[in-house]
Image (cartoon, grey):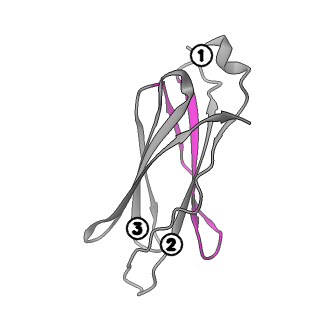
Amino acid sequence: MIRPDRLGTGILLVAVAALGFACANTKGTQPRYGFELAVAPSEDETATYKTVVTVRDLDSGKVVVQPKLFSSEGQPATIEASDRAAGIDFTITVEIGTAGRIATYRAELRDADGVVTTQDATVELRPS
């Protein structure tokens, strides 16, 4: 259930500056990805927070995938997505800390040979 004191806080944004991953693929190019997270109190009574993860190709600026995760404080939420053209799969896990003040996330990138790279970060959440 959403606590009333969360509804008035507005959208919380997590700005993740150009976190690029260079990944080899079968075409011989190396896509680079940036991750942006936007966290807001959920309007759905079944979850406390909604996190939108935007994965961009850093060279073109194109949005590759934009999954949404729903979670309660202290409970990790995981989603899988793919950049099919590049042959890269993403596993993204986000956890909102107690009191909604921090968020941690992990992005894991895999190709046909296995894990290419992982990125972990903890960021402070601030009202927008």
| Residue 39, position as x, y percentages in the image | 61, 37
Note whether 104 is above or below 25 in the view shown: above
**Label 3, on which residue?**
88
Decide which of tag 3 and tag 2 comes sooner along the chain: 2
Name the kind of residue labelled 1 in the image: Ile
For this view, does 85 lie left or right of residue 56?
Answer: left
Q: Indicate the position of residue 21 as horizontal and vertical percent values.
A: 45, 68
Q: Tag 3: Cα neighbours inside 10 Å, few (<14), some, or many (≥20)? A: many
- Between circles 1 and 2, the one closer to the viewer is 2
Q: Secondary structure at mark 3?
A: strand
Magenta span has 112? no
Q: Residues within 10 Å of mark 2 (few under 14, many from 20)?
A: some
- Are there few (<14), some (14-19), or many (20+) residues within 10 Å of tag 1? some
Label 2 residue SS: loop
C-alpha distance separating marks 1 and 2: 37 Å
Instruction: Please say if the residues under marks 3 and 2 sit with CB atoms less than 8 Å apart.
Output: no
First of labels 1, 2 by sequence position:
1
Give left or right: position of 112 versus 41: left
Question: Quick check: 43 left or right of 22?
Answer: right
Asked if residue 14 is positioned above or below residue 7 in the image, the reply reads below
| In the displayed structure image, the side of residue 85 where residue 57 appears, left or right | right
Quadrant in which the N terminus appears: top right
Residue under circle 2?
Answer: 32
**Camera-side mark, 3 or 2:** 2
- Element on which disc 1 rests: loop
Residue at the image point whose x is 64% and y is 68% from the top: 62
Look at the image and give the residue range highlighted in magenta: 47-73
Q: CA distance from mark 3 to mark 2?
A: 11 Å
**What mark, if any, has residue 2 been given in the picture?**
1
